Image (spheres, grey):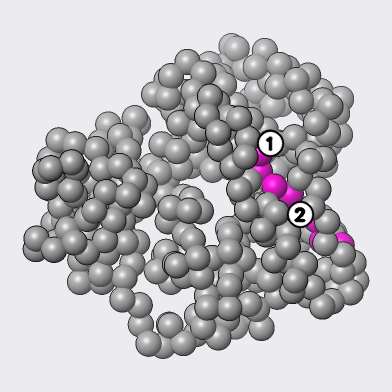
Amino acid sequence: MTSFGGFDMPVEYCGIIDEHIAVRTAAGLFDVSHMGEIEIRGREALTLVQYITSNDVGRLAVGQAQYSALLRPDGTFVDDLVVHKISDIHYLLCVNAANREKDFEWIRSHNRFDATVENTSDTYTQLALQGPRAAAILRQLTPLDLTALRTYRFAFDKVCGVHSLIARTGYTGEDGFELYFDPAESEKIWDALLEAGKAHGLLPAGLGARKTLRLEACYALYGHEIDETTTVWEAKLDWICKPDKGDFVGREALRAQKQKGIERILVGFEMRDRGIARDGYPVLQGGAECGHVTSGSYAPWLKKNIGFAYVPLRASAPGTRLYVRIRASELAAEVVPTPFYKRPK
């Protein structure tokens, strides 16, 4: 167990590698109830969500979710989040655990519209069932037609007889579901999922496997790849930024940076020498420090040592040789195309 975002969280249950492999080959069950939920309701709910997020919420249909960002006026990150359109006047935002109070106050400070903003984080348990066997497991516990629920869609139905929001979303690179429901039902549904998954190889999984899975799949983590010093262009998240949708916080700064051009960019790398590049280790080129590792680890599925780093544009092309300072040694690494891992079709 470890402290994470103000919560006591499991790092591992039976071992990070075993849990990682289970998610890639069968299924893993994560308790992610530490994540924050903020709900926006009202006649101008859409207008507010459009203004505070970078992606185009106007494209969403009811029952559709979208990855997006909350940005500062200078175009850097307040947080990343998933927006769920429950109705034309009701949106559910899932934000990072450590940022939920900060995000709530940030949104409230920009609410000049006919909409209400409520921090409902403590009214939800969130469980993530991830892996190629996730649908087969969940199908035993819900009447919802899961085959009709496409990626980044959600629906309301019963899970073990409990009213739930069932979203086909996740943070592992695999197919899977995130379930939101009353915290009073937490143990009932957790135990039922584990029991239903026994025959499918389901394992409970902790923060350790969550890190290595998201790293292989190249998902950014707030405080590492994205923070109040990085922009969507630098983080290669331009696909969640739609400057042409209309005004939003950070839009003009991002337009200016786009016109001027960025000076650094996030890259993925593989170690070529034996060694693991840990978070925060210096990255060098030509003997001079040019960046630092934002996330690094052994990748259990790929069986490689991989990582992310911000580097100057001149050092960002695949095949570029870099070095990572690990204790007293400078070990070779190479920029590679990302994502490191793609789910088989």
Which residue: 39% across, 24% down?
17
Label placed on residue 38: 2
Instruction: Assign the magenta stretch its main secondary structure.
Output: strand
Q: Is residue 213 above or below residue 21?
A: below
- Residue 53, given in percent of the width and then of the height, sits at 65, 69
Ranked by sequence position, the earlier of labels 2 and 1 is 1
Looking at the image, how many numbered discs can be counted on the residues? 2
Please name the residue that numbered disc 1 is placed on. 33
Local SS, label 1: loop
* Residue 27 appears in the rendering: no
**Residue at 32% across / 49% down in the picture?**
280
Amino acid type of the residue that numbered disc 1 sits on in the rendered structure:
Ser
* Residue 256 part of the magenta-drawn span: no
Q: Are marks 2 and 1 in contact (CB under 8 Å)?
A: no
Tell me residue 285's x, y (percent). Answer: 14, 61
Viewed as shown, does residue 250 lie left or right of 173? Answer: right
Q: Nearer the viewer, residue 286 or 319?
A: 286
- Disc marking residue 339: none
Magenta span of residues:
33-41
Residue 181 falls in which quadrant of the image? top right
